[in-house]
Each structure stands twice: as structure tokens, then as C-alpha cells.
Image (tube, rainbow, N blue to C red):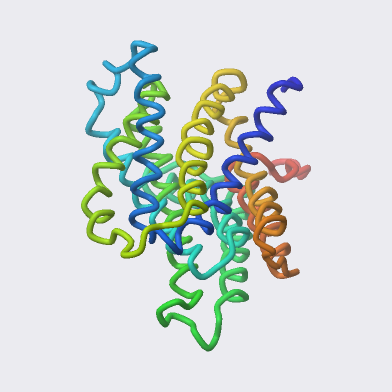
Amino acid sequence: MNAGNAVELLSLAALWGGSFLFMRMGASEFGPFALAGLRVLGAALFLLPLLVLRGQFGALRANWRPIAWVGLTNSALPFVCFAFATLSITGGLASIFNAAAPLFGAAVAWAWLNEQLNRSRILGLGIGLLGVLGLAWSNVNVEAGFKPGGSGWAIVACLFATLLYGFSANYTKRRLHGVAPLAVASGSQGFAALFLLVPALVWWPAEPPSLRAWSALAALAVVCTGVAYILFFRLIAHLGASRAITVTFLIPVFGITWGVLFLDEMVTGAMLFGCATILLGTALASGFLTLPASRLAPP
């Protein structure tokens, strides 16, 4: 990885970490469905012209069914879940749960695709699961719990979104291997916009959102989704998918930082410990870290 790649990786982490900041700024005025719907619509309008200019629209047309499924499981539903979660928990906490996506991806690959797990990955799944459960337990408001507005349902929404990310990554690997990444990205945003069209209209905000909320939405759609996808594709082309996905480990750093700087969010010791535990488990479960080989001689 050269200096240019490192800058792009940090920029991508900063953008995706910023998405949690902008969701918190816009979700309370737009509502989860309208915010997510407008987010994917804006990203689609940004990406689809690029797809046409590069002459890759045929890849989208030939693979529209699996791309539509990716749009539902990798954008429409997770974006709604995280927007709903940021109504009652901080963006920094939501970004930590988001970091568990590769952890769920490894579990889905084992359960669905029969991918073998060595002792490092099994240990990582266990550590990551304990980190997720511990972080969830420490942040559930005992009094509000699972009542409307309580943190319980927000945490469930985050975990469901990360599970969907894990499923979608494996589905994409199985059904869309070799398809132009820009076709998958732009097409999935377009189909996600179609899936969310009716819910967004049904739950459209009764009061007109403020300029601050519209500005957050614009940044969320164009910068944190459209531009971020382009950076991600560049990293995949230059570094390969396995190295590009390391951005997942940096997103909570920026998610927490932006929340503290711009929204005065609080950071607790439990959050930091839970984040470190989840990242350690994710690194082991996804193969970025491995246990040292046993020195015992075979019998």
C-alpha cells in the first residue's frame, strides 16, 4: 500500500464514518424511511450516469435480478435500520455495531456456503459475539428498554443491519462474481430507491425538514454513498478486495470522532472496550489476524 492508497483508505473510512453523523442529523426530521429512500435515490442519480458513460450498463441489464436483491439487503433495509437506530442511540455507537459486519459475514459463509473455519476464525467468532452482546447489554436503557424510543430496538436494528451486510457480501460473492463493481453499486442503489419509494411516501414527514436536515441528506447521498463507492472501487482495483475491506476497522474511529466533535456525543469506557473486542474478533474471524501455528510435532 503506497501513500496514495493509504490516503484513499482513510478518506473512505472518514466518509463512511460520517454517514452516521449525517443520519443522526437528518433522521429526526425526515424519519427513517424517507431519509433512507432519498439517500439511495440521490446516490443512484449520481452513480448511474457514470455507469452509462463507462459503457457498463449492459452488465446491470444482464444481472438485474441478483443486483436488485443486493439493493434490498445491502442498502434499502440496512439504511432504514441504521437511520431508525440513530433516533435513540449515538452515531458512534451505531458505527461500532456496523464494524461487526465482517463478523456476521464469516458466520453466514460458514452456515450457508460451508466455508471451513480454522481455530483462529472460530475464536474470533466467539470473541466478536461476546463483544457485541456485552456492548448491547451495557447500552440498553433499563427503564425504556424495548418501549418506543428506547435503545433496545435501536440495537436490534443495528444488529439486523449488520447481519444483512454479512449475508449480502456472501450473496454478492456467489452470484455477482466478475460483474463490474460500478454496475452492482449503481444498480443496487437504483433498485433500493424503488423498494423504498412507497414506504418513503407513506411515512413522508408531516413538517417540512429544515435546511440543516436537507444538507445532511445531500452529504449522505452524494458524498457518503456515491463518492464513497467510487473510492471503494478504486481501492479494490489497486489493492484487491481483501485489503480494501480493512476500511471496516477504521470506520468506528471516525464515527465516534465526528459524533464527539459535531454533536457532543459521549464516549464511555464500555463503548471503547466493546469496540476493541468486536474489532479483535472481526479481525480473527475474517482472517486478517491468525493465531500462531502450533509447535507440537504430529504424532
- Does residue 218 appear to the left or right of 271 in the view shown? left
Q: Position of residue 182 (x, y in %)?
A: 41, 24
Q: Residue at the bottom extreme?
A: 143
Q: Is residue 279 above or below residue 56?
A: below
Say which residue appears at 78% left-offset and 42% top-offset.
Answer: 295
Residue 272's spot in the image, x, y percent? 72, 62
- On the picture, is 94 further left or further right than 277? left
Q: Is residue 34 above or below residue 207?
A: above
The residue shown at (54%, 51%) is 22
Identify the residue at horizontal 62%, vertical 64% (top origin).
131
Q: Which residue occupies the foreground of this view, 205 or 148? A: 205
Q: Quadrant of the N terminus?
A: top right
All told, the count of numbered labels is 0
Q: Residue at x 62, y 75 (%)?
A: 138
Q: Quadrant of the C terminus?
A: top right
Above or below residue 155? Residue 220 is above
Residue 24 horizontal/vertical position (percent): 53, 59
- Indicate the position of residue 168 as horizontal and vertical percent values: 39, 43
